[in-house]
Amino acid sequence: MNLQASWVIATKEFKIFRRKRTIIYGTILFPLLLAILFPLVIIYAGGKSTGGIPPAALPPLMNAFSFFFVIAAGILPNAIATYAIVGEKVEKSLEPLLATPTTEVEVLLGKGIAAFIPPMVATWVGASIYMVLMDRVTFSKLSYLYYPNWTIGIILLVLAPLAAILSIEISVLASSRVSDVRAANTIGGLMFIPFMIIYLASEIGVIDLNNSNLLIISGAFLIADVALSYFSVATFHREEILTKWK
Amino acid sequence: MIDTENLTRKFGDLTAVENLTLHVDDGEVFGFLGPNGAGKTTTVRMLCCLISKTSGVARVANYEVGNEADSLKIRKIIGLVPDNVGIYDNLTAYENLDFYGKLYKCTKSQRKENLKRFLVMLGLWEKKDVMAGTFSKGMKQKLAIARALIHDPEILFMDEPTANLDPESAKTVREFIVQLKREKKTIFLNTHNLDEAQRICDRIGILNTKLRAFGTPEELEQSVGPRKTTIQLEQINDAILNSLGKLSLGNISRDENKLTVELANPYKENPLVIRAIVEAGANVQTVSVSSSSLEDAYLRLARERE
């Protein structure tokens, strides 16, 4: 495999996204919003008169908040990945691209890299701001810096990247079936559901988002990523694209 | 340069291309004519290794179509101008070409040189930093041609390059193809435009699922039937008719002082005819040749399936 070809394709996608303001704003704003919103919740929740959230309730709450960065990593690549493929469909630029001496996997990898890097960077930057602000607002109650810790490490370095890959693969599959970006986004947006189920399950006490459970969820994501990678590669096949994609 | 033998492609029950056998020489401009749905685009896609063949053999520059390892080699030495130009609207003309140059692994200096050369040749150099999305159809078509040539391919496949273009843009594209022909590029040109094919192509194939005819434009014209030479005389007499009778020509018909003679090869036989009737005492007023055109050949051959 020629990784240089994939990188050439990825840099071309970066160039295009830089000119798509809605995609840039969406990618940057969501993690940034989470980074600012959650510390504000800690400050204002519970009311000043009652002394706010009790210290013992803070760690599980902060773990649940941290999980939103997995959701961000799972949702944000959808817009870029669908545009990278459906955009090419709309512009009918896949045929000349596929006529070059690049393999389908190289093309797919290039688009995957383009859809992976900006959301992950935005998520990591947002999470870093979140950790700094959270430590600042919770230090007085906890008497120690909660972040960084293993939980956020697993979330940001294992679970979030796996979620982003899953999102990209689902977007590839969705993009092959539709011919406009909005429809592909809607289908890809269904990625939100399993993440919300996990989050809600943690909120109602069905599962605890502790390190071992996060690793189990990561394992499940990994299996799903590997399985969907086969489908994505099979879907992104020259012949399929030129004869069956509408 | 391009060889196919019984090349066939089926989509389910539909046969798009059936037993196509043809040969395109190095440096030749080959025109592929046929109605919509005749299988022209399918053929180009097979030869560019974009879709597989159902059966038969195809070779491009001695690489075998359908062989996985050869497919990449074929795609390296060909350039494709597809039916839909597929230009990136959110990239400038320069960025569009530079991207493809990088994919073909051209060096920076090669990219720079070819980019300038083709953009200048196609009159787009001044617009190199303008977003391609703002370009007219004709400009996008020219950009697609430049894109297909950025790596200096040995063979250029062009699928309807002048379709939907205004006459001026179409003329520029045609002139550019002629220029490439002078540079001895092998060009496989899918077109609906008979006049274009006649003017540019060395040989023409008429496809309607099967290859219906193959040859030079002149050969195809002749294949439709004899050409007619009409001679307007001052007066016709028996001596003139007898002199023509001795030449064993095709049908001769007379309409007052006008003679119409069917000739297989008017360029060769006209002088003989004229000499014979002049020697028989005729005063020739006008001579005109009405030939079967490529259009006649195309219409007859393309309709054969129907």
Image (cartoon, grey):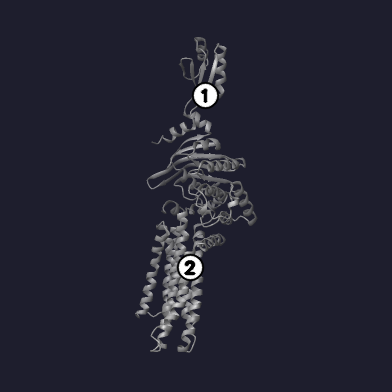
Q: Residue at x 49, y 84 (%)?
A: A136
Q: Please indicate, yes or no, whether residue B1 appears anywhere in the rendered image.
A: no
Same chain under badges 2 and 1? The reply is no
Kind of residue sitting beneath label 1: Val
Q: Quadrant of residue A195?
A: bottom left
Task: Judge the density around disc 2: few (<14), some (14-19), many (≥20) Cα neighbours within 10 Å.
Answer: few
Assess disc 1: are there few (<14), some (14-19) or many (≥20) residues with their C-alpha within 10 Å of its C-alpha.
Answer: some
Query: What kind of residue is marked 2?
Result: Tyr
Q: Are marks 2 and 1 in contact (CB under 8 Å)?
A: no
Q: Secondary structure at mark 2?
A: helix
Residue B254, image x, y percentages: 46, 16
Outermost residue toward the front in this view: A49
Question: Residue A139, percent across and down?
Answer: 48, 87
Mark in front: 2 vs 1: 2
In 3D space, how far apart are the residues under numbered discs 2 and 1 (Cα atoms)?
A: 71 Å
- Residue A164 shows in the view: yes
Quadrant into which the N terminus of chain A falls: bottom right
**Which of the two residues, A84 or B255, is positioned nearer the viewer here?**
B255
Give the total of numbered labels: 2
Mark number for residue B289? 1
As displayed, is residue A36 above or below residue B22?
Answer: below
Label 1 chain ID: B
Q: Position of residue B296 (x, y in %)?
A: 46, 31
User: In the displayed image of the protein, which residue is found farthest to the top?
Assistant: B238
- Residue B8's disc is none
Residue ID at (51%, 74%): A125
Tell me the tag on residue A25.
Answer: 2
Quick one: SS at disc 1?
strand
